[in-house]
Amino acid sequence: ACHLLYRFNTGDACGPNMMTRNAYALNNEIFRRLPKDGPLPVHVYLESNMGGDKKPSWEYFNRGHGKTVLAWTWMPDAAIRHFLKVDPEELARLEWTGLHGAHASGMQSFAFTPASAIAAIFLTTGQDLGMVATSSMAHATIQERPDGASFGLQLGGIEVGTVGGGSALPHAQSYLRLLGCQGPGSAQRLAQIIAAAALALEVSASASMASHGSENFFRAHLERGGHRGQTD
């Protein structure tokens, strides 16, 4: 078996259909040029898992498709204690424990819940929901500083487009217009907006999990999970 990986630039389109057509044409051209007296392929496939399409994998996380984006923010101690209801050192302890758990379970990336924010924006802007899993492969960091803490989230391959596919649907066009994601360079802007939203969720979820015994995380689910009346 021989796996051949192509690399394409699809501009502001997400591009899976473009890549399929071009890969098919390239495969046929390679097959046509092979010497007839040498070894010939028995079967030729467009996808055989090496590229990681819609399937999280080390290969995908290392050199995935789509846009690579880093979102970063900083919060002072007072804001963390007031709004997030935790101390910065509690967040740092959670990160250490989370990295240990991610390593022990064989995770390809480390973050708590970027998929929720990514799925929401994918749905409203007409993206391929099959790409949520791979687009959510991320690395989150929390770094204590003397005056607060910094939060970072790197998404190595957000697969989004602002032209073609589901992004052309009327509801998707409305949301893309609202986000200012139309015209040249708009796919990169959309990826940046998604990363910012995912980071905001990551900070909030991490803070609730870092609270004593993860009580804030528990109470948020208890009070907003539709079962409050049954527990009263």
Image: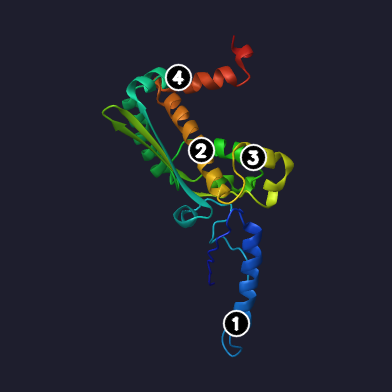
Q: CA distance from mark 2 to mark 4?
A: 21 Å
* Above or below: residue 18 compared with residue 99: below
Out of 200 and 95, give the one closest to the viewer: 200
Q: Quadrant of the C terminus?
A: top right
Q: Earlier in the sequence, mark 3 or mark 2?
A: 2
**Residue 102: % across, % down:** 41, 41
Q: Earlier in the sequence, mark 4 or mark 1?
A: 1
Q: CA distance from mark 3 to mark 1?
A: 50 Å
At mark 3, the secondary structure is helix
**Residue that badge 1 annotates:** 40
Q: What residue lies at 68% left-to-right and 42% top-to-bottom?
A: 173
Tell whether 221 sits left or right of 109.
right
What kind of residue is marked 4? Glu
Outermost residue, top direction? 232
Tell whether 45 sits left or right of 201.
right
Q: Earlier in the sequence, mark 3 or mark 4?
A: 3
Out of 186 and 212, give the one closest to the viewer: 186
**Residue 227: % across, % down:** 62, 17
Q: Quadrant of the N terminus?
A: bottom right
* Tally of marks: 4
What kind of residue is marked 2? Pro
Q: Which mark is residue 114?
A: 2
Q: CA distance from mark 1 to mark 2?
A: 45 Å
Q: CA distance from mark 3 to mark 2?
A: 23 Å
**Residue that badge 4 annotates:** 215
